[in-house]
Amino acid sequence: MSMTVERVSLFSRGAGVTMHGLLSARVQCVRSPWWGLPKVAGATPNANRVVRVHNADRLVHGLRLAAATPLPLLRQVADALVGEMCAGLEEEGGSDQLKMLPSYVENLPTGDEEGLFYAVDLGGTNFRVLRLHLGGKGQVLSQESKEIAIPRELMVGTGKDLFDFIANTLATFVDTEDILLDSKSNKHREAGFAFSFPVRQTSVKSGNVIQWTKGFKIDDAIGKDIVKQFQDAISRSGHDVEISALVNDTVGTLAGGRYNFQEETMIGCILGTGTNACYVERADAVKKWKEALPKSGEMVINLEWGNFRSPWLPRTFADDEVDKESVNPGDQWFEKMVSGMYLGEIVRHMLLRLAEEATLFGDTVPEKLREQQSLETKHVSKIHADISSELQTVATVLHEVLRIHDTTLEQRRIVHSLCDMVGQRGGRLAAAGLYGILKKIGRAGPNKNGFALSRQKKTTVVAMDGGLYEHHHPYRKYMEDALQELVGTNGPYEVFLRLQNDGSGIGAALLAASHSRHRQTE
Ligand code: BGC
């Protein structure tokens, strides 16, 4: 049987629009050939404005339908994620979406760690170096850090240039310890390395880069041991710093969560420039693991969920555009719908289309809307958070960032609703991801006995980090509410999300401490 499938347009091409007498009799509605939106011929400026807003509203309505995240869809997304998780644990490459990378982390911090440890946190547009003085009994005696923006050319250059840059920054930072403590720079030091890109680890302190994400593209580093590259650069800087733990930022965040909160911390999740999650799995469930099982019987698995894709993901044309224009088209679909690097771009594409198809901002399309990255997620966040009656912050952002001046309240309302839609979708999809992991580890969803009420609730803590989660409040609220809806309030489970500030870096230093060669041989 053959079937013709017509690709359903994002924007519905419904019947003609009733103007509810808003337009004067002189105004004719002409169907535009492409989107079927009414155009105005010879209309008064006021009528023109009304039609523009009306057309834009129709387009927004179509987008809302395409981007909707009702609860049943979120459950489907979560189930699809669980399916991929299982396939990825079964055998290497078992899932072509989730890498399910064993982290080799056996000793999550306990609070007993003592001494001075460093961390280097490379993950987004900024990187940080940290120094942590641990005093045992869960005490952090002192903590210093320095954050530096990575020059753009280094994000797409060579491995040597990138690692020389971060090794030299680490060296300068280490030298400040000498000044502070009046010690010598040739002293041996240990550091944790939070490296927030997909890495196939070969031990707790070695691993090969699988691919780059978040705008980085350093081809000559792919397939090579990232710690060796960094360690060589540190040697070139003339310092003696040993990397004793290589961790993904999610793993660092989970470790920090264990240290600060409690052993109920089972998941680490980042919602920042990129997104990802890791969790504590039963070691015997990791079928692809061919080495001796860890004594703890547990293993921290890095999902690399940014690359999750499923037909259930509510995509719009803007997601396709963002993907096409990225340095890694076809990859990281979930990340491109959820994380901070992309939300601004998604909204920009939607606004551009509204400007082109519905002349939302007048007859000429504002130039800034055509410029990639002109609207950043921090701007979307500001717009989203504006709850004033006149949407004054929205006006300011449009004026200052996109050079769209003298906007009307209706225009601002539409811009606000797009930011809300994109933020809502991102937050709710992130919640679906977490719900999937919780189901996988038996901390949510119907258990074998159904939802039998138990007296004692089973508590799970999710350690969270990332600028999007920390600063984009409406996004965070959408996420938390959705997770609450998914997990339910009457069942035997409760889930707490805890912000683990600077989680990845601190966690990396803690893991360097808990995996320290010197500590183990003591
Ligand atoms: C990377 C992950 C990382 C996440 C959050 C993603 O792009 O692939 O390894 O954990 O960003 O930083």
Image: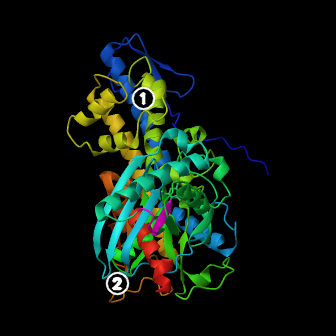
* Residue at 69% in and 68% down: 94
Q: Is-magenta flag for residue 388? A: no
Q: Is residue 395 visible?
A: yes
As displayed, is residue 17 above or below residue 260? above
Give x and y (percent) for residue 155: 54, 44
Instruction: Tell me whether circle 1 and circle 2 mark residues in contact (CB < 8 Å).
Output: no
Q: Which residue, given by chain and number where applicable, does mark 1 sit on?
A: 55
The image quarter in which residue 182 lies:
bottom left
The image quarter in which residue 310 lies:
bottom right
Q: Which residue, given by chain and number where applicable, does mark 2 sit on?
A: 457
Which amino acid lies under the numbered mark 2 shown in the image of this protein?
Lys
Closer to the camera, 341 or 201? 201
* Residue at 28% in and 68% down: 142
Give x and y (percent) for residue 225: 64, 61
Which amino acid lies under the numbered mark 1 shown in the image of this protein?
Asn
Nearer-N-terminus badge (1/2): 1
* Residue at 50% in and 39% down: 152
Number of other residues with Cα within 10 Å of mark 1, as a class: few under 14, some 14 to 19, many 20 or more = many
Give x and y (percent) for residue 185: 42, 62
From this viewpoint, which residue is outermost toward the left?
389
Disc 1 from disc 2: Cα separation:
50 Å
Label 2: state its secondary structure: loop
Residue stretch rendered in magenta on the structure: 185-195
The image quarter in which residue 258 lies:
bottom left
Is residue 275 left or right of 323 when viewed as pictured? left
Give x and y (percent) for residue 409: 26, 30
Number of other residues with Cα within 10 Å of mark 2, as a class: few under 14, some 14 to 19, many 20 or more = few
Label 1: state its secondary structure: helix
Looking at the magenta stretch, what is its main secondary structure?
A: strand
Can you tell which mark lies on residue 160? none
